[in-house]
Image (cartoon, grey):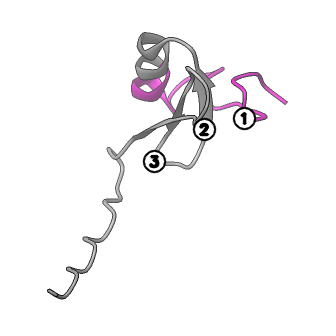
Amino acid sequence: MTARAEAEPMLTGKHVYRVHWVLGTDRLRGVCHCAAAREFDDPVELWTWLLAHPEGPPAHQPTNGNGSTR
């Protein structure tokens, strides 16, 4: 049995974005480097939001996890 390699540290920084598939759905969750997050049905809308964020409104409004604002 071989020893398990340690996981690499997670990247951070101003240009690090995360896209997660929401289990059991067809939705994607985008997470900006500033920790704002939204869910999307369309990957093009997700990347448009991520790449414009946090520069302009309404992109920086908090969401309730399903893509709509609180």
Sequence-earlier tag: 2 or 1: 2
Which residue type carries mark 2? Ala
> What numbered label is drawn on residue 65?
1
Q: What residue sits right under mark 3 in the picture?
A: 33
x then y, percent, for residue 25: 61, 25
Task: Kindly report the distance in space between the C-alpha atoms of the residues bearing marks 2 and 1.
Answer: 7 Å
Which residue type carries mark 3? His
Residue 6 sits above or below residue 26 on the image: below
Which residue type carries mark 1? Gly
Give left or right: position of 21 versus 59.
left
Q: Quadrant of residue 6?
A: bottom left
* Quadrant (top left/top right/bottom left/bottom right) for the N terminus: bottom left
> What numbered label is drawn on residue 50?
none
Q: Please, what secondary structure does the residue beneath circle 2 have?
A: strand
31 part of magenta stretch: no
Give left or right: position of 29 versus 52.
right
Is 25 in front, or is 66?
25
Q: Which residues are magenta?
A: 49-70
> What numbered label is drawn on residue 37?
2
Cβ atoms at labels 2 and 1 below 8 Å apart: yes
Sequence-earlier tag: 1 or 3: 3
Q: Residues within 10 Å of mark 3 (few under 14, many from 20)?
A: some
